[in-house]
Amino acid sequence: MGMIVEVENGDENDVVLVPPSNFSMVEDCIFRSSFPTPSNFPFLQTLNLRSIIYLCPEPYPEENLEFLRSHNIRLFQFGIEGKTDVSMPVLKDSIMDALEVLIDVRNHPVLIHCKRGKHRTGCLVGCLRKLQNWCMSSVFEEYRRFAGVKSRAMDLTFIEMFDIISLRQCLYSIIYQYHGYGSKKRRLLYKDENLQTPPRLTSF
């Protein structure tokens, strides 16, 4: 999934904007894709990103870090292995941590990506959909649409078994009070900003 957008800039040449493969809007101010390359940077600029959630364990390339630095974009890294036999407890903890960052509107607009934008990204988006009270058939359909023939039964099982109640309890524990995510007035209310523990931020 992707597109090429030509933007006239008044010069002799047009600017061609190329999104990463598997790019899509999850919902307002939340996007997903495969790993961005330098050819995608002009397109990413148009999103006015505030944060990127990176779901792979490998170090972020220096040229990508330089792009983030130059545009004041924060990087949140959650090192989930891409292999099929990943530890379920480790996967659950990483997805839980990533969701805490994802639903905090202070981090929006945000781009979620792994390597190909299929499995790890699909698991995170699938768990978000559960938090939004999507029916499981719709959650699975969306996962399969991006994973294609590479769809993994273990991912679908993980999404189905993911305990959203645990996420809500975790949010309460860090003094977040969650209200109506997915609605037009979605927001996070903070009981005491001075007591707020900031989410983990990968340093450059």
Image (cartoon, grey):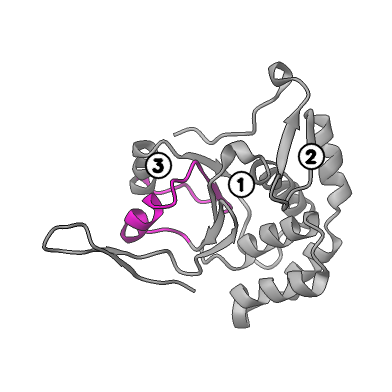
Kind of residue at badge 3 = Leu
If you read the primary sequence from the N terminus, does the residue marked by circle 2 or circle 1 appear first?
A: 1
Q: Can the viewer see residue 171?
A: yes
Precedes in sequence: disc 1 or disc 3: 3
| Quarter that holds the C terminus | top left
Q: Which mark is residue 68?
A: 3
Q: Residues within 10 Å of mark 1 (few under 14, many from 20)?
A: many
Identify the residue under disc 2.
Answer: 178
112, above or below 156, in the image? above
The one of 152 and 29 positioned closer to us in this rendering = 29
Task: Name the mark nearer the viewer: 2 or 1.
Answer: 2
Between the residue at mark 2 and the residue at mark 3, the CA separation in whole angstroms equals: 29 Å
* Between discs 2 and 3, the one toward the N terminus: 3
Residue at 60% across, 49% down: 79
Q: What residue is shown with label 1?
A: 78
User: Mark 1: which secondary structure?
Assistant: loop
Estimate the x, y position of residue 93 in percent, counting from the top left: 75, 47
x, y percent for residue 85: 71, 65
| Place of residue 7 in the rendered image (x, y in percent of width and height, measured from the top left) | 28, 63
The residue sitting at the left extreme is 12
Distance of label 1 from label 3 (alpha carbons): 17 Å
Marks 2/1: CA–CA distance = 22 Å
Q: Left of 6 or right of it: where is 27?
A: right
* Amino acid type, label 1: Phe
From this view, report whether residue 138 is shown above or below residue 98.
below
Magenta part of the protein: which range? 35-62
Above/below status of 102 relative to 43: above
Question: Which amino acid is tagged 2?
Answer: Tyr
